[in-house]
Amino acid sequence: MLADLVAGALEDAERRRADRPLAEVEAAALARPAALDALAALAPADRVKIIAEVKRASPSRGSLAAIPDPAGLAASYQTGGASAISVLTEERRFHGSLADLEAVRDAVSIPVLRKEFVAEPYQVFEARAAGADLVLLIVAALEQKQLVELHGLITQLGMTPLVEAHSADELSRALETGASLVGVNARDLTTFELDRDLFGRLADRIPSGVIRVAESAVKSADDVAHYRAAGADVVLVGEALVTSDPVATLGEFLGV
């Protein structure tokens, strides 16, 4: 599944490149105002922080929510207390787009994450050109050389990489990049199976000074509390918010 998602994302990036060459996207990226400081926004605090996600669909669950107004949803997340917004930009299985990201960036004043299967520099420049402050890097999708190079490019452009792992080995690879923001995804992206306890098994391996993000398997405030008790500084939540009253649910999660 992960290999198919990455291949599709690269094909879609190649199609966009035909209309908008790298030099044009790079110029647009460099012309953007400086990215927001995501590490400051997500720094450990007395309460858990939430990255709230704009997510229409997923390969495991299919359609989740139409979200005709991603900017409005993101604005409600910000009002509700989210520390950052994640925007799915993958088109085929998640029904997202860079236009969603641009609309969200214009609507909020907190950091915005491009959540995509990033595997080449063009996608990183696209992210900055669209206004992203953070870019997701999935360890399982990348060779180590790619991972290090993309991490470096994201940082060079003033953005923050969120480096995502799903095993102890992947976590070691994430930390080798010098990542300051590391996510542990309960969902195995090769099988899409969930393991809510994975974060707890890996959290102690993440050094102090690195912000710890728990991802996936969040349906209720109890799940957020479970991650917080295991040491999560931040929890990324998508499906539970878009399939409910987002502001009320966010309030419950932030009350943990």
Image: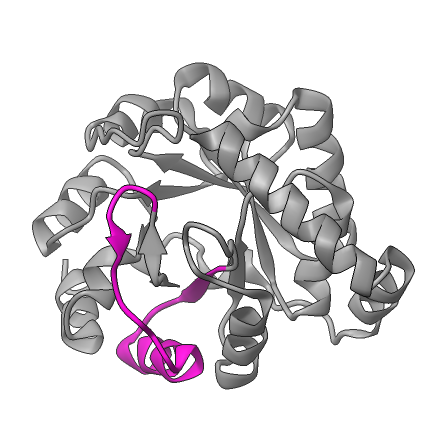
Q: Give the image location of residue 222, x and y in percent.
A: 8, 49
Q: Give the image location of residue 152, x and y in percent.
A: 75, 40
At horizontal 14% and vertical 46% (from top left) the residue drawn is 223
Asked whether 148 or 11 is in front, the reply is: 11
Quarter where residue 47 is shown: bottom left
The quarter of the image holding the N terminus is top left
- Above or below residue 217? Residue 234 is below
Q: Give the image location of residue 127, x and y in percent.
A: 66, 60
The quarter of the image holding the C terminus is bottom left
- Above or below residue 188? Residue 162 is below
At horizontal 22% and vertical 28% (from top left) the residue drawn is 195
User: Can residue 229 be found in the magenta stretch?
Assistant: no
The residue sitting at the right extreme is 23
Q: Give the image location of residue 130, x and y in percent.
A: 66, 69
At horizontal 70% and vertical 63% (from top left) the residue drawn is 128
Quarter where residue 187 is shown: top left
Asked whether 42 or 162 is in front, the reply is: 162
Asked if residue 155 can be seen in this view, the reply is no
User: Can residue 87 be found in the magenta stretch?
Assistant: yes
The residue sitting at the top extreme is 169
At horizontal 48% and vertical 81% (from top left) the residue drawn is 108
Q: Which residues are magenta?
A: 59-88
Asked if residue 33 can be seen in this view, the reply is yes
